Image (cartoon, rainbow, N blue to C red):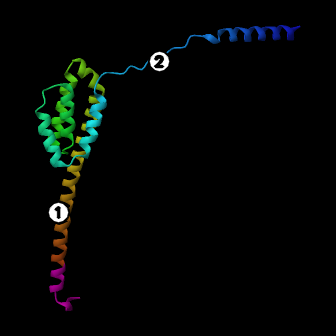
Amino acid sequence: MKNKILLLACCLLLAACAAQSDAPTSNIKLIHSASNIDELLSYNAVLRKMPPAELGRELQRINAYPASPSNNVRRAMALSMTRDPIDLAKAEAQLWNVMADNSVEAEKLKPLVQLLVSSYADLRRVADNAEKSSIQLKDAQRKLDQLNDKLEALKNIERSLPAGGK
């Protein structure tokens, strides 16, 4: 009898599950922002391939553009490609201007700007560390040269001593 009740309960449970198969599912909608992030990313790729002379001309051209969040991002991207610490600081300042802007265009660009700000900060840290390492290397080389000079002087003194003193 218990087996029949258990079998009946299982059948009812399976029937209930089958009836619920049409449960509503959530639809995920991808929202495509009308910002020009794709264009800016493509522009960055083009900038990376430019030789320094052409990059300088591009910077002059960008500086003539009117101020807008996307133009500030373009200017920052171009400035960052010069690999000059001063230009990198200028690029970060351009990006912070976009971060402070509350316009619709700036709001759409903020995820990209945040990524660029952190990337440029890392670049500055690496450049600072490279400069410190370069200074330390020069100091170590100078000390090594001084020690070699002292060693040569001691060798010359030893050579000038009479051989019979031993």
- Residue drawn at x 15%, y 48% is 53
Which label sits in the foreground, 2 or 1?
2
Q: Nearer the viewer, residue 84 or 55?
A: 55
Q: Which residues are magenta?
A: 155-166
Tell me whether the residue at label 2 lies in contact with that at label 1, contact meaning CB atoms closer than 8 angstroms. Answer: no
Give the residue type that dot 1 points to.
Arg
Q: Nearer the viewer, residue 85 or 41?
A: 41
Which element is circle 1 on? helix
- Residue drawn at x 38%, y 19% is 31
Mark sitting on residue 142? 1
Of the two numbered discs 2 and 1 on the same chain, state the one appearing first in sequence.
2
Mark sitting on residue 28? 2
Measured from the top left, where is residue 3 in percent x and y? Answer: 86, 11
| For residue 91, above or below residue 102 | below
Q: CA distance from mark 2 to mark 1?
A: 65 Å
Q: Within the image, what quadrant is residue 153 found in?
A: bottom left
